[in-house]
Image (tube, helix red, strand yellow):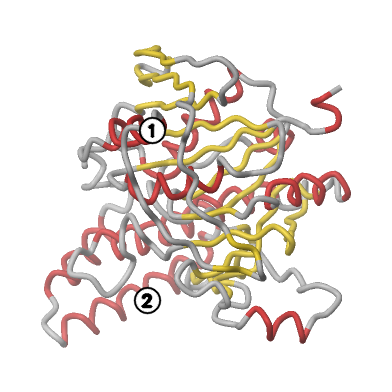
Amino acid sequence: MRDQLFPHVSIIILNWNNWRDTITCLSSVLQLKYPNFSIILCDNHSTDHSIDKIHDWLQGQLSFQVDFPEIDNIVVKEHKPHIPYSIENYRYEEKEFKKVSETLHRLTRLITVIDTGSNLGYGGGNNVGIRFALSRFNSTFFWILNNDTFVLPNSLNELVTYQISRPNSHLIGSLILDFENPSTVQMAGGASYLSFFGVATPSYNGFKLSTLKNLYPNGIPNHCDFISGAALFMSRELIDSVGMFEEQYFLYHEEIDLSLRGKGLFQNGFCERSIVLHKQSATIPLKGKSDLKGEYFDLRSRLLFQIKFYPQNLLVFYFFMLFLFMKNLLIFDFQRVKMIVSIMISPKKNPYSHV
């Protein structure tokens, strides 16, 4: 009866060397009002003792203070565990889940923590969580959350209600607001996609939320070609039909790939009443940093996506990459020149997979 009224949702959060943001995310998830969900935290083999830090926080042994802003008169405060949570620790080895330890307390929410064994990237790490949920829980839905998100208490209720009222929507996005400035929209559900250059444009990015509410009093229109992977709600039916995330990208474009595979079979949905706050590229900066990992994966994934879905556009895309090559060569940015050449020659090679 409970699963009929409130279908089970597996919430999957992926961490890599960023336990502070993950604790902030968990703090919000543990305040969700939806009564039937499980939390699966996958750690991509962090080197900063993330699992230990998160475990200590869940047991009430680590003090961590975060101040959260007021959003539409809703004040959300940090959740501090007063009663230790039940934790199961697993290690993912040779495509099997091996239990490492467990700390169980009666009448407390169970949180599953999985060490993936290596850095599997966004798709691989989240797929480990999905596989565990499929083998352990009879989940109807899955909510993939970036660890630098913060969800409002009603956000999951709204997603489930939206999907039940629109049964052909099997990939659903939330209204994503800027974590530092919640009056500003990062994206409404997801983004549009220009296939020629592999460029994604977040829906309504930079708009003031009050402006959008005034422009669209009957609801913000859905203009998404794909749903953002920062907060992606999807059904078991979609996974059974098209599979999980494509793992070859490692980072970026996984959600676009998934949306395109589901195109024609299912609809993308946008639930305006489900609100999520998001920090921008907290784990790996995308631009403006001396570390080029973000730029490398962005350009590499765009090329891999073109090869897989739009081979007819490859000539145009290679000209675009040649333009980037010449632009950086002229300003003597040889680090980026080398990066572009390596992607053009060996797009499937991932020099960062070991980190």
Q: Quadrant of residue 74?
A: bottom right
Q: Residues within 10 Å of mark 2 (few under 14, many from 20)?
A: few
Q: Secondary structure at mark 1?
A: loop
Q: Are marks 1 and 2 in contact (CB under 8 Å)?
A: no
Q: Quadrant of residue 322?
A: bottom left
Tell me the kind of residue under disc 2: Phe
Residue 70 point in image, percent of width and height: 57, 68
| Residue at 29% across, 78% down | 324
**351 left or right, relative to 33:** left
Q: Quadrant of the N terminus?
A: top right
Q: Nearer the viewer, residue 115 or 28?
A: 28
| Residue at 32% across, 53% down | 347
What residue sits right under mark 2 in the picture?
319
Tell me the kind of residue under disc 1: Gly
Q: Nearer the viewer, mark 1 or mark 2?
A: 1
Residue 349 vs 149, above or below: the answer is above
Q: Is residue 315 visible?
A: yes
Residue 325 point in image, percent of width and height: 24, 76
Q: Nearer the viewer, residue 126 or 332?
A: 126
Q: Is residue 194 visible?
A: no
**199 left or right, relative to 90:** right
What residue sits right under mark 1 in the picture?
60
Total numbered labels placed on residues in the image = 2
Q: Residues within 10 Å of mark 1 (few under 14, many from 20)?
A: some
Q: Nearer the viewer, residue 63 or 7?
A: 63
Residue 192 vs 310, above or below: the answer is below
Q: Quadrant of residue 204?
A: bottom right
Residue 355 point in image, percent of width and height: 21, 42
| Residue at 65% across, 32% down | 37
Residue 126 point in image, percent of width and height: 48, 38
